[in-house]
Amino acid sequence: MPRGRVLTLAVLVSAVFAAHANARFDALGSPGLGDPLFPLAGNGGYDVGHYALQLAYEPRTKVLDGSATITATARQNLARFDLDLRGFRIGSLKVDGRPAAFGRNGQELQITPAIPLKSGRQFVVNVSYSGVPSAVTDPDGSIEGWVATNDGAFVVGEPQGSPSWFPSNDNPRDKASYDISVTVPAGLTAVSNGTLVGQSTRNGRTTFAWRESFPMASYLATATLGRFVVTKGRVAGIPSYVAVDPSQVAGSAAALAQFPEIVRFLSSIYGPYPFDTVGAIIDNAPEVGYALESQTKPNFDSAPDVTTLAHEISHQWVGDSVTLTTWPDIWLHEGFATYSEWLWADHTGQFTPQAAFDYYYSLPDSNPLWSPPPGAPGDAANLFGDPVYFRGAMTLQVLRNTVGDAAFFRILRRWATQYRYGNVTTAQFIALAQQESHMDLGAMFHRWLYEPGKPAV
Ligand code: TRP
Ligand code: ZN
């Protein structure tokens, strides 16, 4: 093609771009995704497809050296975009192999690539960083993120702990696949999500290479490390990897013995297990005070009872595979996982979900169980409060009593299969329940999810 024609085409193309408001090359990716509770978590303007993290941790000095290679796609023209990262000294930062300018502002790592990124283009960010990670203190006072332990670290990220150990688009809407490799002093074990694809020791250090190829929200990533007794095998036909702190082995045995039956039972409720590995990480980190459903390997701060184990395994379907879009919908995780506990209790002959409902319903109006309502926790400090868990589960029992068992279990299974690996809203759950039951459930859901105070039955 003659030179003149190419030039004409280039002029035409840039004129078309300029005409489109969003297509300016000076466009900035937003510093957050506007979550009502965590407005700065995540970043606008791009989607991450894959994180490749290479980490090395020295428990003696507590220094974490990291290199993150992030493959993403621009969703608008980007002169600048953000990642979420808390602390650390940045060694080098490149976009598509070229050094990029960067600034820091709170948890925002602001990156200006040498060449602006065009909408639709895939790009690769490489960040090398080093420092002593700090745990994140949540609005409810609990700690998360990279929590140092006597022999390593307990690593949990809900709702905002991941930026304490790797640069990310820390929002549950941007799921990605992960390769996480962790190098630790020989004798320690580093456990992450998915499959162990490599383990090698040299010069007194062992590298564990993990791969999670299923879509995963950043808050579900883990890299818990320390002294562990590891059991590899199969659970309900699925490859499993269970790591238990030596001090917790005896206390965990009874619950772990139920692991296969829990997976089989929950598969009968929600459909096939959504990932290709199962497991658990049982550490000794009692200062954390809770367990977390890290994808394929829930983290426990101490030996769990069987109810807690069932709760976290159920989250693999409701929470990890089917994930909220914004944090105020957290009852879609915790209400369902609590209801799963009640189903397990029924399955094992302990009590029925109706008995659990009746017990909680007997609590007086003044009990903190009733407010704020589970569908509108209102403040980030209430995310993991009693209403979200118990009144959330009670809402499902009211649904069951309203639509009958057949429709109810169809709804649960359809929810977990239709929205597998996706992000959901409460409105989508209500719509699905109405569609499966052919009933108008709007008033019932409104009363149970959104009105403060004890609902009338
Ligand atoms: N999601 C966890 C569960 O399975 C609980 C949890 C995560 C939590 N982060 C928290 C509880 C912070 C209290 C504070 O129930
Ligand atoms: Zn839970």
Image (cartoon, rainbow, N blue to C red):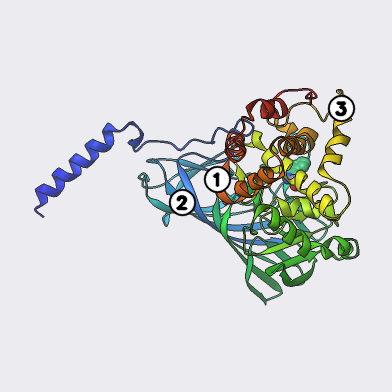
Query: Would residue 158 be seen by someone viewing this image from the given angle?
Result: no
Q: Is residue 250 left or right of residue 275?
A: right
Kind of residue at badge 2:
Ala
Upstream in the sequence, badge 1 or badge 3? 1
Within 10 Å of the Cα at label 1, are there few (<14), some (14-19), or many (20+) other Cα atoms? many
Query: Would residue 66 be seen by someone viewing this image from the given angle?
Result: yes
Which structural element holds mark 3? Answer: loop
The residue carrying mark 1 is 169
- The x and y percentages for residue 389 are 77, 38
- In the rendered image, which quarter is residue 425 located in? top right
- The x and y percentages for residue 401 are 74, 37
Q: Which mark is residue 423?
A: none
Kind of residue at badge 1:
Asn
CB within 8 Å, label 1 to label 2: yes
- In the rendered image, which quarter is residue 454 located in? top right
Which structural element holds mark 2? Answer: strand
Mark 1 or 3: in front is: 3
Name the quadrant of the N terminus: bottom left
CA gap, disc 1 and disc 2:
10 Å
The residue carrying mark 2 is 72
Q: Is residue 46 left or right of residue 104?
A: left
Residue drawn at (72%, 67%) of the image:
236
The correct choice, above or below, for 209 with respect to 383 in the image is below
The residue carrying mark 3 is 367
